[in-house]
Amino acid sequence: IESGSITLHPRGIPHGPHPGTIMASKNATRTEELAVMFDTQHTLELTEQAVALDDPKYPQSWLE
């Protein structure tokens, strides 16, 4: 995930910080980032342009 990235998590699949992130930030006093999360009542539908931006490696990033 890079600056300007957007991730979409399917309903019912929990997610949280990547492995090691909490420990790596344990002594941090601040971070220079902004994260926004929103929940919807209805399923989002992706445009063709959004589908074309899919990163097939993203699911593996949770294993790092």
Image (tube, helix red, strand yellow):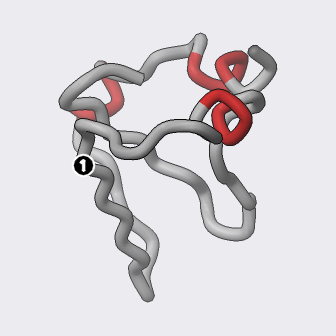
Amino acid identity at mark 1: Leu
Identify the residue shown where x is 36% and y is 71%: 38
With 17 as the anchor, is 4 left or right in this view? left
The quarter holding residue 19 reads top right
Q: Position of residue 61 (x, y in %)?
A: 65, 19
Question: Outermost residue toward the bottom?
Answer: 41
For label 1, the crowd category at 10 Å Cα-Cα, with few meaning under 14, some 14 to 19 and many 20 or more, is: few
With 36 as the anchor, is 39 left or right in this view? right
Q: How many marks?
A: 1
With 16 as the anchor, is 53 left or right in this view? left
Q: Position of residue 25 (x, y in %)?
A: 58, 36
With 41 as the anchor, is 20 left or right in this view? right
41 relative to 54, above or below: below
Pick the residue in front: 19 or 25. Answer: 25
2 relative to 45, above or below: above
12 relative to 30, above or below: below
Q: Which quarter of the figure is the N terminus placed in? A: top left
Q: Which quarter of the figure is the C terminus placed in? A: top right
Q: Position of residue 5 (x, y in %)?
A: 28, 31
Identify the residue shown where x is 37% and y is 64%: 37
1 relative to 26, above or below: above
User: Circle 1 — which element?
Assistant: loop
Q: State the residue position of label 1.
A: 34
